[in-house]
Amino acid sequence: MDLSHPADRTRVPSPTAPPAAAEATLAEVGEFGTIARLVARFGTGPQVLLGPGDDAAVVAVGGAGGSGGGRVVLTTDVLVEGRHFRRDWAEASDIGARAAAQSLSDVNAMGGRATALTVGLAVPPGTALAWVLGLADGLAAESALVGAVVVGGDLTRADTVVVSVTAMGGVDGEPVTRGGARPGDLVAVNGRLGWAAAGLAVLGRGFRSPRAVVDAYRRPVVPYAAGPQAVQLGATSLVDVSDGLVADLGHVCASSGVDALLESAALVVDEPLQAVGSALGTDPTDFVLTGGDDHALVATFAPGTALPAGWTVLGQVVAAAEERGRVLVDGQAPAGEGGFRHF
Ligand SMILES: [Mg+2]
């Protein structure tokens, strides 16, 4: 059971993975290597406007290539009991809200707004009905924050609880990918960084306080208005922080072929994070740099863009040095920048 990095995001690196032996395991090939091989089997089509590798896909509906129809933003996330949540650490409604938030945030990270969700739910037969209904209440409540509705799903039996949420939505304008950051752009964040990681750190040591960070872990406060706002502000790239600021901004840098320089003085280390850092003897800046699950949005904007309240500039985009896609803090590669790997 590994709850040290509960974020669960998948993305596709450059499909240059070497061939693996037929008997290779996922542990040997790795998360990204496995995904690259899976994606290669699925092919594509004219309706695929943006395929695997971003926060969500963009698909034309009602007409191939987008003619005579609309565009849908589409994403799926899976939460597994024991790996992504524990039923003794959070109420069922909180777990449902988190499950919805993960997928709703990925639509947000394309600059979109979700409209509908479907939910795949697997539960042991001895699970209390009240727990499942609580989960549903959390899914509904989080979805309602963006005006989305759960419109269907599937219920089946399993040995542990598994919740899979698929969200679809639309973008008022052009979807913002991870690939458009340019040298000179501002790097800015909207939303909390490190709160959920600090909450998980104290829960993992058997504590239940500070309450603010434990609550943040149980139910993230997602900046749902910021995605559509980023589109209006002309964001050049957009990603939600689910694996950590450095890891997720690193994916933007890799996709865009640039580096990012962050200033540590611009990183806000909120008071509850400082309290957790003091109590646990850890540097609270690590929560900010590597913590996922708060689903903050990180965007890049053309230099000189006037950013409204809620956005904090953390640094800037620069031309890639020799090693492509680096994120540096005060000119140094931060510890723990690798992000989470699931295999
Ligand atoms: Mg994402």
Image (cartoon, rainbow, N blue to C red):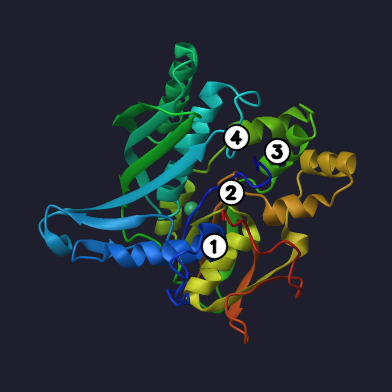
Whether residue 310 sits left or right of residue 33 in the image: it is right
Q: Position of residue 6 (x, y in %)?
A: 61, 44
Disc 3 element: helix
Whether residue 14 sits left or right of residue 241 in the image: it is left
Q: Which residue is mark 4?
A: 82
**Nearer the observer, disc 3 or disc 2?**
3
Q: Which residue is mark 1?
A: 30
Q: Which residue is mark 3?
A: 200
- The amino acid pointed to by label 1 is Gly
Closer-to-camera residue (250/131) = 131
Q: Which mark is residue 310?
A: 2
User: Dots 3 and 2: beta carbons under 8 Å?
Assistant: no
Q: Residues within 10 Å of mark 3 (few under 14, many from 20)?
A: many
Disc 4 element: loop
Q: Can see residue 192?
A: yes
- The amino acid pointed to by label 3 is Leu
Q: Quadrant of the N terminus?
A: top right
Q: Can see residue 50?
A: no
Closer-to-camera residue (123/74) = 123
Closer-to-camera residue (295/234) = 295
Tell me which corner region of the image, top left, top right, bottom left or bottom right, holds residue 154: top left
Sequence-wise first label, 2 or 4: 4
User: Dots 3 and 4: beta carbons under 8 Å?
Assistant: no
Q: Position of residue 42 (x, y in %)?
A: 28, 62
User: Number of labelled discs?
Assistant: 4
